[in-house]
Each structure stands twice: as structure tokens, then as C-alpha cells.
């Protein structure tokens, strides 16, 4: 997915939550992916994003990346990481990145990724 699609997906998820029809405690109820697909079709009519093929995987990836960034910035060992608001990415010294990546393999993609949706 491209950044425009990510932004639309997150906006539609917020709208879906605010409507409340598919809310279930800390998650969405069954069928929410199909509703997201319909909502995205209205916002991005030519994107052809499908619930199972695209949305489910992208939501999982966004959650994973958000959790990594959150832990870097707010976790117990967060003193070495900062946030660059202008570039919208996590920043630190190269030595800190190298140390972090050696013990957190999934964090490697975070090093150069922007997070405009945070």
C-alpha cells in the first residue's frame, strides 16, 4: 500500500470506530474488514483494496510498526531514542541503532521509515 492508502485506511478505521457499529471492547467485531473495504472503495475507488488480501495484512503491519516505535519512544529503555517531528521518524545515534537492531530484528525497518500517521 502507498502512503495515501495507509492514510485513508486509518481514517476509515477511525470513522468505523466512531460510528460504533463494529466495536467490541478493544477490537472490532467480525465483518469489520468487509465494511472497511466498502468504505475505502468510496474514498479510493480505483485502489481495488480487498479485505483479506490487503487490509488484514496492512493493519497487522501498521500495528506491529506502531508497537515498535511506541516502545522505542516510551519503553523502559527509551532514553536513547527521539522523534523528529519534521521528518516524522525515530532518531538516534548510529551506535544505538546498531545495538538495537542486533537484538530486535524487526526494528531494522524502523530505522529509515517515516511514520506520518503517528
Image (cartoon, rainbow, N blue to C red):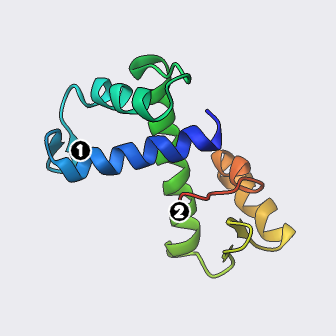
**Position above or below: 34 against 118:** above
Residue drawn at the location 16% of the way across and 44% of the way down: 23
Residue drawn at the location 49% of the way across and 56% of the way down: 67
Q: Quadrant of residue 91?
A: bottom right
Residue drawn at the location 69% of the way across and 56% of the way down: 114
Residue extending farthest bottom = 79
Residue 21 rendering spot, x and y as whole percentages? 13, 40
Q: How many other residues sit within 10 Å of disc 1, few (<14), some (14-19) or many (≥20)?
A: few
Residue 116's tag is none
**What is the distance, in whole Å, between disc 1 and disc 2 at their CAs?**
19 Å
Query: Disc 1, disc 2: CB below 8 Å?
Result: no
Report how many numbered discs are placed on residues in the image: 2
Q: What residue sits right under mark 2 in the picture?
A: 118
Image quarter of the N terminus: top right
Q: Quadrant of residue 30?
A: top left
Q: Is residue 78 left or right of residue 30?
A: right
**Position above or below: 118 against 74:** above
Q: How many other residues sit within 10 Å of disc 2, few (<14), some (14-19) or many (≥20)?
A: few
- Between label 1 and label 2, give the one nearer the viewer: 2
Q: Helix, strand, or loop for circle 1?
A: strand
Q: Is residue 25 left or right of residue 9?
A: left
Residue 47 rendering spot, x and y as whole percentages? 55, 24
Q: Is residue 90 left or right of residue 78?
A: right
Q: Helix, strand, or loop for circle 2?
A: loop
Q: What residue sits right under mark 1 in the picture?
A: 27
Residue drawn at the location 73% of the way across and 54% of the way down: 101
Residue 92 rendering spot, x and y as whole percentages? 77, 73
The earlier-in-sequence mark between 1 and 2 is 1
**Position above or below: 100 against 27:** below
Amino acid at each position: 500500500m502507498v502512503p495515501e492508502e495507509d492514510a485513508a485506511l486509518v481514517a476509515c478505521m477511525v470513522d468505523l470506530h466512531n460510528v460504533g457499529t463494529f466495536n467490541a471492547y478493544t477490537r472490532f467485531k467480525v465483518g469489520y474488514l468487509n465494511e472497511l473495504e466498502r468504505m475505502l472503495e468510496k474514498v479510493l475507488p480505483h485502489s481495488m483494496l480487498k479485505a483479506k488480501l490487503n487490509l488484514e495484512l496492512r493493519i497487522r503491519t501498521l500495528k506491529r510498526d506502531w508497537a515498535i516505535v511506541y516502545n522505542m519512544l516510551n519503553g523502559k529503555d527509551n532514553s536513547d531514542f527521539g522523534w523528529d517531528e519534521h521528518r516524522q521518524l525515530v532518531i538516534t545515534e548510529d551506535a544505538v541503532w546498531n545495538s538495537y537492531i542486533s537484538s530486535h530484528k524487526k526494528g531494522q525497518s524502523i530505522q529509515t521509515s517515516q511514520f506520518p500517521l503517528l
